[in-house]
Image (tube, helix red, strand yellow):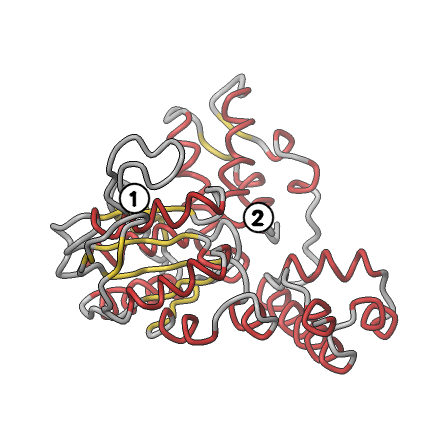
Amino acid sequence: MKPEIRKLEFLGASAIYCSEVMQQLIRVVERVARTNAAVLITGESGTGKEIIARAVHHYSLRCNSPWIDINCAALPEHLVESELFGHEKGAFSGADSTKPGLFELADGGTLFLDEIGELEAKTQVKLLRVLDGVPYYRVGGLRKISVDARIVASTNQSLEEITRCGKFRRDLYHRLSQLHIKVPPLRERPDDIAPLAEFFLDRQNPRLRFSSEALEALKRHSWPGNVRELRNVVTKPAILAEDSEIRASSLPPEIRDSPSLFTTEDRYRLDAMERRIIVQVLGETSGHHGDAAELLGISRRTLSRKLKRYGMGISLENCAAR
């Protein structure tokens, strides 16, 4: 029997899925949401971590309270503390008025910290204290502020690795990961590829449809860029379509020419095996990429590309150099 396609809305963001792995994930999210514990969401870039974060708020007892989000990587370092904790008038050049921080705006609700691994050390210390319930000062302030905001954080990095490198506080990592949700990459949930592709196509032009060959080509691709890549791949042929059907020939060469030598399950097993071997060899070489690449019989550039593909972009070599 064909699995049922599910479409849910979380704070205006659509979650489209039918795979068993995503059904299980949403059930976990529902249980996690009912607590007040901090949640760490991890996964490769483009997997939909923000949608899962919104789902946590949606299913929580705080759902009628504020949802506030910030991308920690999008702000200059000197503005992050001001954005999170606010500032008083005259605290620094350009501070022409008092501004409440995002923690204050999220009081009673949820504060989502995207790309949490990008926070500088000084901000990490202050964040840890606030998570522990310690009142804080706005930048330049004299009055302590107390808030009750649930923290949901996400990252496509390995916080374990950057913690070992000393770039992220171990105590903060443990505080943030009271509950850990890992969003699987699209290649591990192939049943979701066609529903997502058809959803993105319908948003561009509801009169269009995919040919069966085009859908098969989409299913064969490994999608290293995950859902974001799929959305971008669908957009161009949808805009340029001259009739009502998107054929395989309209897809990019890397999509329509994807090999089908293995079943999807075989590909997952091979990917998992390759990842384990790479991790093992990096451990044997103390994280040195050059030595690891030589042992693996591949170029250093190929090794870097594979590390990025498997969400292992933080170099263990950096740890070895410390």
Q: Quadrant of the N terminus?
A: bottom left
Label 2–label 1 contact, CB within 8 A: no
**x%, y% of residue 228?**
50, 43
First of labels 2, 1 by sequence position = 1
| Disc 1: which residue | 87
| Amino acid carrying mark 1 in the image | His
Relative horizontal placement of residue 318, taking residue 264 as reference (left or right) = right
Residue 210 vs residue 309, the one in the foreground: 309
Q: Which mark is residue 151?
A: none
Coordinates of residue 20 in the picture (x, y in percent): 38, 65
How many labels sit on residues?
A: 2
Q: Is residue 65 left or right of residue 216?
A: left
- Count neighbours of disc 1 (C-alpha within 10 A) and say few if under 14, some if 14 to 19, many if 20 or more: many
Residue drawn at the location 27% of the way across and 46% of the way down: 101
Residue at position x 31%, y 37% in the image: 90
- Dot 2: what SS? loop
As shown in the figure, which amino acid type bears the numbered disc 2? Answer: Gly
Q: Residue at x 29, y 61 (%)?
A: 151
Q: What residue sits 70% from the left and 43% below the top?
A: 257
Vertical side of 222 occupied by 230: above or below: above
Q: Residues within 10 Å of mark 2 (few under 14, many from 20)?
A: some
**Residue 112 at what x, y percent from top left?**
32, 53
Q: Nearer the viewer, mark 2 or mark 1?
A: 1
Residue assigned mark 2: 225
Q: Left or right: 54 with respect to 164?
A: left
* Extreme residue in the top direction: 242
Q: Mark 1 falls on what kind of element? A: loop
Label 2, label 1: how far apart the Cα atoms are: 38 Å
In the foreground, 226 or 165? 165
Question: Based on the displayed image, in which of its 4 quarters is residue 129 positioned?
Answer: bottom left
